[in-house]
Amino acid sequence: MQSVNKAAGDLLNKISVYAKMVDEALNVELLNHSDSAFYELLRHALDSGKRIRPIILLLSTKAAGGREKDALREAVAVELLHTESIIHDDIIDDETVRRNRPAFHLKYGFNPALLTADFVFGIILDIASHSKKMVGEELSRAALQMCEGEIMEMKMEAEEGEVPLDKYLLIIKKKTASLFQAAATIGAKVASADEKVVEALSKYGFNIGVAYQIQDDILDWGDGSKIARRIKDKEDASKKMLAEVAVKYALEAKMSLKDLPNSEAKQILCEIADFAVNRFS
């Protein structure tokens, strides 16, 4: 336990510089809308978070031989898409608390929450339209997949009985892994990486996204995903089985990077894979 905590602490120290870069880039983007009626709402919506997706984007850019500063607006777009999805998800799931605060729609109301999410999507479109690397395709693909995953989950929650593992995995691949995959892919594309490197980082993002979401569901076992708790295996030990599946995907994420040149960024991406399944929050 102590070694796990130390590893997590060391990783958080390493990525803190990237988190700071993301926060500064978000502030710059928000200042473009300082005269908007949505400004304070945006600041609240973006006031906290692990920034794990944009951090993966920046690290992917660096691992692919590029410069983090060239990928900052794209990293902002990824974090904004995540933020927009959170606002919508909390409304759909009737959540009352998010990150130890009242859910956005409870603080500001349903209509302002929906309009804020729409405004956020408008900012994402603006960033995509100005990107030299045509990242709009990756962002739109992720947004479509996230919506597909959400409605699949809604339908599954309305049904009774056991949930097959493959259906659960399909939902989280669409709902969560798609944005992780987009983040890593965009990072590689901003670095003008060759096709093999883009594919390697894309696989990394996808696999780390699956592992990350499974661990989220394990950590929130009592109050999180309703369908995760309905997965059964032969010994009715679904929680243990899911932990093993998460480790498998985390290992796949690391393996996808094996042919990339050794670098600090590559090493941190591997450590994030370990953190994804060993974290406690």
Image (cartoon, rainbow, N blue to C red):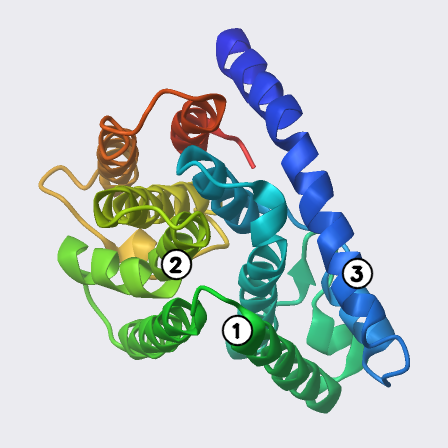
Residue 128 numbered mark, or none: 1
The residue at 51%/50% (across/down) is: 53
Give percent across and percent down for residue 74: 55, 60
Can the viewer see residue 145? yes
Secondary structure of the residue carrying tag 3 is helix
Please determine whether, in this image, residue 128 is positioned above or below residue 267.
Answer: below
Please determine whether, in this image, residue 6 is positioned above or below residue 139.
Answer: above
Three-letter amino acid code at disc 3?
Answer: Val
| Mark 3–mark 2 CB contact (< 8 Å) | no
Q: Earlier in the sequence, mark 3 or mark 1?
A: 3
Three-letter amino acid code at disc 1?
Answer: Ala
Give percent across and percent down for residue 109: 76, 84
Which of the 4 quarters of the picture holds residue 94? bottom right
Please determine whether, in this image, residue 29 is positioned above or below residue 110.
Answer: above
Secondary structure of the residue carrying tag 1 is helix
Left or right: residue 269 versus residue 39 is left
Left or right: residue 93 versus residue 243 is right
Q: Give the quadrant of the C terminus.
A: top right
Can the viewer see residue 219? no
Which of the 4 quarters of the picture holds residue 250? top left
Secondary structure of the residue carrying tag 2 is helix
Give percent across and percent down for residue 126: 61, 79
